[in-house]
Image: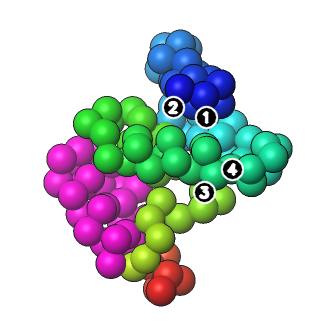
Amino acid sequence: MTELRAFMESLVDNRAPELPAEAIAEILDRLIWCVSDNGEEILAVRDKWLDSGDEYRIAVALSMSDVFPFNTKVQLEEGLTGIARRFPNLRGKCIEWLGHSSELP
């Protein structure tokens, strides 16, 4: 595990009680622009979180606003449908992202 990946995992694992996912997402959105790989590793971790069974990590991933959570419209629709089905509390975030689906190929 690289240092950045470990940092991200530690940030989530050691967050303050009741910290909203948006707070962590804001840090990660800013960090994308600060690292030498233009956020590639951050986005790789985010992609793993989207596929995980951890509702909080998925909420963080969906709350990141600088980059789409999936690369194509089909992937976005399929991924968000699955997430909304498994985690009803995240349905609103999924619907929000689906509203932007026309911006993807």
Residue 59 makes an appearance in the image: no
Residue drawn at point x = 44 percent, y = 50 percent: 47
For discs 3 and 4, the disc positioned in front in the rendered view = 4
In front of the other: 46 or 16: 46
Secondary structure beneath dot 1 equals: helix
Q: Amino acid at mark 4?
A: Gly
Residue extent of the magenta highlight: 74-98
Q: Amino acid at mark 3?
A: Ser
| Mark 4–mark 2 distance (CA, rounded to whole Å) | 22 Å
Can you identify the residue that label 1 sits on?
23
Q: Inspect the magenta stretch and tell me whether residue 36 lies in it.
A: no
Can you identify the residue that label 2 sits on?
20
In front of the other: 17 or 58: 58
| Mark 3–mark 1 distance (CA, rounded to whole Å) | 12 Å
| Mark 3–mark 4 distance (CA, rounded to whole Å) | 13 Å
Of all residues, the one furthest to the front in this rendering is: 1
| Within-10-Å neighbours for mark 4: few <14, some 14–19, many 20+ | some
Can you identify the residue that label 4 sits on?
39
Q: Position of residue 85 (x, y in %)?
A: 17, 54
| Within-10-Å neighbours for mark 1: few <14, some 14–19, many 20+ | few
Can you identify the residue that label 3 sits on?
65
Disc 1 + disc 2, Cβ < 8 Å: yes
Residue drawn at point x = 44 percent, y = 65 percent: 70
